Image (spheres, rainbow, N blue to C red):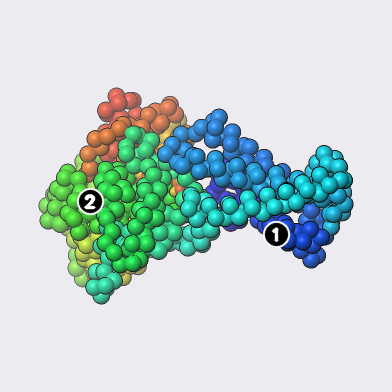
Amino acid sequence: MIVLGQRKLLQRLVPGLVHAFIFWGFLVLFPTIVMATIAAVDRESTLPWLGHQGWFALMVDVFAVLVGVGVVTAAVIRKVVRPARFEGSHLGEADLILALIAGIVTTLLLWHASRIALGLNEWPASWSPVSKGLSTLFGEGSATRALERVFDWAHVLIILSFLAYLPHSKHLHIFTAAINVFFGRTRAGGRLEPLSFDAPDEELRFGAGTVADLTWKQVVDTFSCTECGRCQDACPAWATGKKLSPKLLIMGLRDQVFAEGPLSLAGEEVSPLVPNAVEDEVVWDCVTCGACIEVCPVSIEHVDHIVDLRRHLVMVESRFPSESETMLRDVERASNPWGKPQPERAAWADGLDVRVLEPGDEPPEVLYWVGCAASFDERAKRAAQSTAKLLQAAGVDFAILGPRESCTGDPARRMGNEYLFQSFAQQNVETLNEARVTKIVASCPHCFNTLANEYPDFGGRYEVMHHTELLAELVRDGRLAPAGSETEITYHDSCYLARHNDVRTEPRELVAAVGQPIEMKRSGKKTFCCGAGGAHMWMEENRGKPINEERVREAAETGAETLAVACPFCTVMLDDGVRQMGKQLRVVDVSTLLAESLDS
Ligand code: SF4
Ligand code: SF4
């Protein structure tokens, strides 16, 4: 559907239709290439059967015109409208390709027209109104006979030039895009492919240091980029003036593959990808929000490239932003990125009578995975307290692991420290399996994503829900009965919840149950990051505008008085943004809104 139906491209109607016209046109017109080649050798011959069909001649006319319309519209978009997403793309090359396509359909129509004028058409002329109309431009004499040869040969030669040029241009995607889409991710959106540290030496891989380390899918990714700039347009890093453009990143990698791929295949030494193909800052600007992957029409997986570059920098070269060193050290030393003592992990639940699961205890119906942020950050703790109260009010049998819960390893993994992540994954899976846990509810979308999508790779298979999913279920079942209000609430979708894991309906059900929802311009799968993902919670944002302020601006534009969130990182980032911008917005987790509505 993505390739044949042009599904992703059609999300933007006009440019999508332009591409669809050209793409579908070439599928339909493919047999005419064979017909023109046969006729170039023998004017009186054509493809058996198909060359004589009126309906096919009609389709050729229709699609040749649609391709022509597509080419003209594309030229207007590129030359007159000039959208920012094309910044950095190879525009001259695109112009040449458009000119070649225009040449192909023009010579095709003129060739058919001249054949009709000469009475050489094997198909009934009445079926091809455009060619028939154009045939009136020609007489029946020797000039038309010569022109018929010129159009046919010109058609064939332009196609051959097109085919010869393609492998050296960005339009290589014509060959590779369908393959890339076919082998695109079927796994959960937020899951990263684990590295195997037990592999034999020759297969060991510590991310991507040179072109030799790229997987075959990553190489095909680079060949498949159409330079459409949709990813760049959606990228919060680019939108706020950072160096990272996912499009330029993929183009940089492709240039390096072209330049050094043959050397690598010959076993010769090749240069590092960072900083030769991609600058250091670009690698660290990414918040792993996945907006680029979501919009890419050819299923390029930018986050996997970026994390692989980080893995090499962190694990092989120990090269990463200095401020994140503290976070990595704290995760390693204290089992949480806040660096707080583990015995304080359950302090948020003091006085709430929450069961802390001890070794050997009977497992609860639901294990509440609190996460480091809600355990240690003062603002985020509130969501954990609200969730616990709500579960108690609904009579859910739940417990927490308390000091036995550790960081899931998510920030270390997104930073590129796969080794550290895997040691935490193994330790947590061991604890959960020993405790015979089967169902988990997590407050943090990052923990939720790791537990649900990444721990199965380490033997941890559980039913994992986000707290908004469980709370919505309890409301639906009548176990919680919130009171509505007139408060206008705009809900911010967390990238790891809405985009990576498709949880969009349940938080909205809760918001609608307690107030009056107002959507932001970018919501659901098109949400705009709060700026904390990809371990950015612990990195300085010292270039461009802060991402969180951009999101707060959009939230404030709705006129809502409350900005609801469902992620502790979003809570902290957006609350910081509100304070820095002096906006009158209350940033609050959906669970707290629900708990307040029950109290009122
Ligand atoms: S994941 Fe987000 S921040 Fe990273 S390149 Fe893609 S759109 Fe940009
Ligand atoms: S990576 Fe995908 S979305 Fe980005 S420019 Fe290339 S084809 Fe377009």
Image quarter in which the N terminus is found:
bottom right
Q: Secondary structure at mark 2?
A: helix
- Camera sees residue 6: yes
Q: Assign the C terminus to one quadrant of the image.
A: top left
What type is the residue that disc 2 sits on? Cys
Which residue: 47% across, 38% down?
A: 86
Decide which of 116, 563 is in the foreground and name it: 116
Whether 457 is drawn above or below 3: the answer is below
Mark 1 or mark 2: name the one nearer the start of the chain: 1
| SS class, disc 1 | helix
- How far across and down, in percent of the image, does residue 335 sit? 17, 56
Q: Residue at x 70, y 44 (%)?
A: 106
Q: Between tags 1 and 2, which lies in front?
A: 1
Q: Is mark 2 within 8 Å of ligand 1?
A: no
Per the model, the C-alpha gap separating discs 1 and 2 is 67 Å
Residue type at numbered disc 1: Thr
Residue 6: x percent and y percent? 58, 51
Query: What residue is shown with label 1?
Result: 37
Q: Nearer the viewer, residue 536 or 54?
A: 54
Q: Residue furthest bottom?
A: 200
Q: Is residue 46 left or right of residue 384?
A: right
- Where residue 434 appears, as percent x and y from the top left, is 24, 71
Residue 44 vertical placement versus 274 (above, below): below
Residue occupying the point 27% across, 50% down: 274
Quarter of the figure with residue 377:
top left
Residue located beneath label 2 in the image: 372
The image position of residue 406, as x and y in percent, is 21, 58
Local packing at callout 2 (Cα closer than 10 Å; few below 14, some 14-19, many 20+) is many
In this rendering, position of residue 530 left or right of residue 81: left
Numbered mark located on residue 350 in the image: none
Question: Which residue occupies 17% across, 44% down?
Answer: 323
**Image height of 283 relative to 518, above or below:** below
